[in-house]
Image (cartoon, coloured by chain):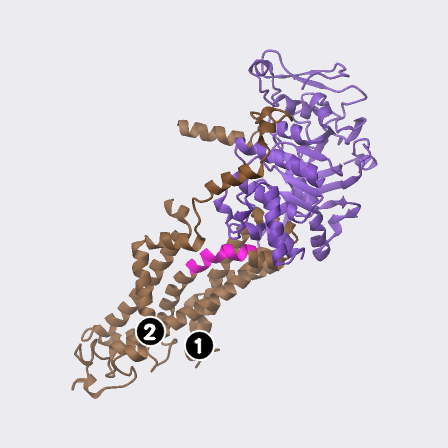
Chain colours: A brown, B purple
Amino acid sequence: MSDDESREAAEQRREGILEPEAEMDLRPGSATAGAELASGAAAAGYFGETLMIEQQSLGGEVWRRFRRDKFAMIGLAAIIIIIILAVFAPWIAPHDPLKQFDEGITMKGMPVGSSAKFLLGTDTLGRDMLSRILYGARVSLFIGIVANGFALLLGVVFGLTAGYFKGGAETLIMRMTDVMMAFPILLLAIALSTTVFSNGGVWLLVVVITIVYWTPMTRVIHGEVLSIREKEFVDAARLTGATNRRILFRHILPHLVAPIIVYTSLGIATTIVFEATLSYIGVGVQPPTPSWGQMISMGQDYYYTAPQLVIYPGLAIVITVLAFNLVGDGLRDAFDPQQRRR
Amino acid sequence: MSAASSQRGAASAAGNGHQTLVRVEDLRVHFPITSGVVFQRKVGAVYAVDGLDFEIKTGETLGLVGESGCGKSTTGRAILQLIRPTTGRVFYEGGDLANLKGKALRKQRRRMQMIFQDPYASLNSRMTVGDIVGEPLLVHHMADRAGRKAKVRELLETVGINPNTLNRYPHEFSGGQRQRIGIARALAVEPNFIVCDEPISALDVSIRAQIINLLQQLQREFGLTYLFIAHDLSVVRHISDRVAVMYLGRIVELAENAVLYETPMHPYTQALLSAVPIPDPAAEEQRRPVVLTGDVPSPVEPPPGCHFHTRCPAAREGLCDVDDPVLKEVRPGHWAACHLITGDDYPHIRAGEDDLGVAVEDAVHPGGESA
């Protein structure tokens, strides 16, 4: 009640007729005016003292907040492990992921379960599951990271152009994103991968995913730029005579680092799922290249008798996606502590 | 807008021998209101600034006062071409800025700068103080790397910031210190003219005086010309040579500092000044502020005739709500836009005796009473 009243009063003061704040005596020669004049020496001593308090870069502060987030740290550890496993798969994997072992199939033609030779068993063609999952991580991460990199690049270019220059460019770009978002994404991807980009292999997926995922990035950047370009420091830069290029890259882009990092990490998670989906329905990574989605699709006929064929690649997808999501959420909180408190 | 053209461009105080640095002619800034998604059409406009004519002379401080939303800040930004004027011209040392584009405009930016209201928003938080203050030098190729550093240190010292802090980031400074950094940035290009857009209203009361004094000291030192935008009448009174009062996109009165505060002639100025508290309890007890009825009309649909007639206690039907008053020189150096000012005659607005009503005396007040 009283809180409301005081807020109301404050608002009236802010919006109301001129705020006559005449507490201070500004007449020349008066005591306050005379005694003040910032003298260099006194000022220097004062600043020297107060400025020692905090000196921490933005990156350091974000890392400090991020470190306190247990789940995000677990996610980060998982991502690091997955990346190491993927990169060093040829050395870590116990077998060639494409080799079909005679002893990998039972007399009845069924895949074998866990054993010393095949830690996670084999698939329906007698190939080592563990090796295939490790190599599958390479495909998933490659597509997730590269496709997001391209989507990010397009998003930054289009988002900056639309948000900063506005006008016709903005209308064109933003309506294009509207059109893209109105498309059924899966149908679009299937259509693209079966027609224009057929037989493209992994790069085909990168292209398809970039085409589909540049829109959300563009919209995020566009929105951010719209708010940043109205900040007074942008006006100040323009007043100093800075060129548009300088304002864009020196003043606006550095403020986009936080949303870019956050949305990219979340985007990688989405992309990995999307890749798995496409591979599952058969338009993504083509056999024999191992991919998690494709492994699930292969194993689904055996889920009664050999559920591990579905469970292991499924777990791989869940863990990877969860890790990227945890890190993305953690980064968002670390970059913007105010938002978290809400 | 009927008879405005005859008097246009002449609203200067009878010359004190000073040269005109900035001349504003029929400046209008209208922000379009659009609707529709792809095919936007204009459905109206915010008449933020609606026909200003005035001059700023070399070395003077022109105060610009008015309530929130009257177009003060827009005026300052339009003069500096941060907002391009809808129509009208802004002459700086005789050259029209409103026609300049691209490189030519960027070159002219060296001559005029701005000090912003919010010292938190006006410094890029991702740049060091040295980069912020040094950027204008870099942009205009005024010095090499070593020269820039020396100049930045010198500038910081000038505004009272420890020059050894140039590798720090803005968030490590207090509001007052940030404002000083903003002033150092404005000074970097050695401008002649600075628009101060409410430079102290976001600051703590205890450090406002410091910034005001710094601004005055710099003006003396570098021969600067200021357009000082504020809503704080006592600050404007302290720092200005002449004062212009704005209401709803127009200047209603412009006069020498002392004249305006002692003998306000426009009814709006009189009401405005009566609202200033007096720092003396006994006198404050006696003060009777004129409380205007109603709100400021929307700048989307400004009232016809005199913009102030809807709230003016002295307004005359058939005159004030029909004809646009022209800003004319009612006494030497004293300009006002009011139909009711004729010769030495002007409406005298004062608070009613026992309520908050407003009374108008039609008597002649040649000398004027205290504000």
Whether the residues at callouts 1 and 2 have beta carbons within 8 Å, the answer is no
Query: Is residue B111 in sight in this rendering?
Result: yes
Q: Position of residue B153 (x, y in %)?
A: 59, 48
Q: Is residue A261 left or right of residue B260?
A: left
Density class for disc 1 (Cα within 10 Å; few <14, some 14-19, many ≥20) is some
Q: Is residue A217 left or right of residue B269?
A: left
| Protein chain holding label 1 | A
Query: Residue under circle 2?
Result: A86
| Protein chain holding label 2 | A
Image quadrant of residue A277?
A: bottom left
Query: Is residue B301 in sight in this rendering?
Result: no
Image quadrant of residue A342?
A: top left
Query: Residue under circle 1?
Result: A203
The magenta span reads: A251-263
Mark 1 lies on a secondary structure that is helix
Spatial distance from mark 1 to mark 2, Cα to Cα? 18 Å
Q: Position of residue A62 (x, y in %)?
A: 40, 53
Q: Residue at x 72, y 39 (%)?
A: B223
Mark 2 lies on a secondary structure that is helix
Q: Is residue B99 left or right of residue A334?
A: right
**Residue A105 covered by magenta stretch:** no
